[in-house]
């Protein structure tokens, strides 16, 4: 499912409010319109996918954490 510009703005606003960080942004993916990139200060954090089922829409945020990122 392709994201609308309005959905992207709403997701960005939601994430900024939820995490208390105005530096969170979103960016469409050129080759894959079914998801958008979530960024923090321009650095990739994860992907957000759009799901439509039974007349309802949900958005799933997926963030991978590497074990080396947990050290220190």
Image: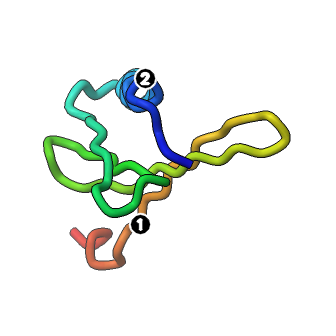
Location of residue 23 with respect to 32 vertically, above or below: above
| Whole-percent x, y for residue 38 in the image | 33, 46
Q: Decide: marks 2, 1 in contact (CB < 8 A)? A: no
| Whole-percent x, y for residue 29 in the image | 31, 54
Location of residue 39 with respect to 16 vertically, above or below: below
Left or right: where does residue 51 sit relative to residue 25?
Answer: right
- Please name the residue that numbered disc 1 is placed on: 64
| Whole-percent x, y for residue 60 in the image | 57, 48
Alpha-carbon neighbours of circle 2 within 10 Å: few (<14), some, or many (≥20)?
Answer: few
* Residue displayed at 68% across by 36% down: 57
* Residue displayed at 34% across by 25% down: 20
Q: CA distance from mark 2 to mark 1?
A: 26 Å
The front one of 43 and 7 is 7
- Please name the residue that numbered disc 2 is placed on: 6
Location of residue 46 with respect to 4 vertically, above or below: below
* Residue displayed at 65% across by 47% down: 51
């Amino acid at each position: 499912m392709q994201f609308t510009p309005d959905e992207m703005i709403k997701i960005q606003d939601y994430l900024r409010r939820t995490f208390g960080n105005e530096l969170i942004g979103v960016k469409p993916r050129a080759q894959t319109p079914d998801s958008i990139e979530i960024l923090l200060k321009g650095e990739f954090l994860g992907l957000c996918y759009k799901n439509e089922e039974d007349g309802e829409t949900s958005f799933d945020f997926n963030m991978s954490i590497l074990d080396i990122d947990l050290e220190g």
